[in-house]
Amino acid sequence: STVNAPGGMTSCIIGVAAYVSPEMMKAEYSLTSNSSKSDLNKPSEADDENNLLVGTTYTWSSVGPTADGSNGVCVCAPGGAITSVSNWTMQKSMLMNGTSMASPHACGCIALLLSACKAEGIPISPPRIQRAIENSAKVMPGLSRLQQGWGMVQVDDAYKHLQETKDEVTEDIYFEVNVENRPGNPRGIYLRQPDESSSSHTFSVRVNPQFKRESDLNDASQRSRIDFEMQFSISTTKSWVSVPETFMLMNNGRSFKIDVDPRCLPHGVHTANVTGHVADRPERGVLWSLPITVIKPMKETRVIEQKNIELKPTEVVRFFVVPPAGSTWMDVTIRDCRDSEEETALSSKLYVLHTVQLVPHAAYRENSEQKYLTLLPNQTSVSSIPVEARVTCEVSLVRFWSAAGILKADLTIEFRGVQPVPPVVSLRSGDCFGLVRVESHLRDEFINPSAKLTAWRTPLRPKSEGTIKPLGERDVLPWNEKKIYQLLLTYEFNQDEKGSFTPLAPTLQNVLYESIYESQLMLVYDGEKKI
């Protein structure tokens, strides 16, 4: 769950994963192999033994679901290219990769579709285009739904879908899907904590049709909304999800109930999809969907050991653990299990360790650690990572996308914890020392406490009450044309000693697209009004 803002915040954005094919590996990265394997075939253990290149997503390409259960990743596209760059780089072109290349690739594909639709007189709207590329995407073998979304963008098939549905006026309708009886009305179902995945649930799913916004509402457009009725057939991809067979939808939206029973699922991550098709026209594909993700964590214990883990080219090995009460950090030990005597070339291999905990009202990056580990055969690495007790923690281990050969590793997770009581240490003016009592509930620990003062924090108030005023004519929010206003505040402070300073505004900083403000700008002047 590393899809954050902006893709994880709204369904109006198409999230694109970055894919690298065997042909790209050879042509752009100069990787060597005994042969190239078509990405149409499913990866196998023999691929590692024969040193074959297998298509996969880049190691750093984000994986769903989002915190509210939505897909996050909609489709995937090639994520690398040798492309032109600015002259200041002192070269004509350079190799660039990642989702910063996959997204422009997908945009180019959509530009081709828009151009063809305009040339052929096919109606264009965001729901039509997104529905076409998702329904026509090709599922790439070896990759999970959370990695690739609906699959690889296929321009020809997407255009064919647009041609076949050009006369369907309901293709311009966007169907908003939410779960009513979950906090925040999320866009999907995400059962991550142990108490959630150990019992059966009934959810109320609401579908609201969103019609194309018209500048001039008249009797005909209003009558079309009144007369709107669609009969859907509902299906699910997994047997542990029960859904009704049919569903009639009207203009003001309706709800239906589904049952999710994850009690018999084994440890790991499990995904399902509830989809809605037009009852008498199933060939139109999926018109709306509700993603479901269930996490079944391992049994809560202080030490977890996993031996001889095979890391296949396209696979992300994901373990879900629950830190016991009293845990404040975990030691993750990884040992490269390759036999140095059998390894013809004693080369190092690059592993990626990524841990994520989803804490309410906090960005995932605040409780996330990512480490790149270069290990020789039989070499061991220990990483100490802070954790929140009793919150499911995802521990992912993956081979770097370009690593070749057979990779096997041992993984050991040991939870540890030392907590001060009380949790905040305070020293009053004139105190020579402060007494701190520490507790460790998991095992005996040796501690070597130290403390030093490295920063002085001074709260500031504005010199005067600020004035709120509207900005220029172009300063409006694009989706609702709402005017943007400006608040200008001035602060003053004196720094008596030489040193650095950092202005902090906690309400404004450490957020990006999820900020409640459109933007912020700080200008710092000295006593002579110089920036």
Image (spheres, rainbow, N blue to C red):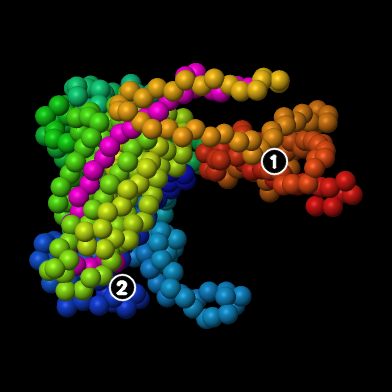
Q: Quadrant of the N terminus?
A: top left
- Magenta extent: 402-427
**Image spot of residue 400 (x, y percent):** 30, 61
At a point 32% along the width and 54% down the height, the residue shown is: 352
Q: Residue at x 49, y 18 (%)?
A: 422
Q: Which residue lies at the image location 15% right of the left edge and 47% below the top edge?
A: 307
> Is residue 515 toward the left or the right of residue 26 in the image?
right
Residue 24 badge:
2
**Magenta stretch contains residue 419:** yes
Magenta segment: does it hold 176? no
- How would you rate the neighbour count of disc 2 (Cα within 10 Å): few for under 14, some for 14-19, many for 20 or more? some
Relative to 181, does residue 492 appear above or below in the rendering? below
| Residue 284 visible, this orientation | no
Mark 1 touches mark 2? (CB < 8 Å): no
Amino acid under disc 1: Pro
The residue that label 1 is drawn on is 503
Q: N-terminal of the two: label 1 or label 2?
A: 2
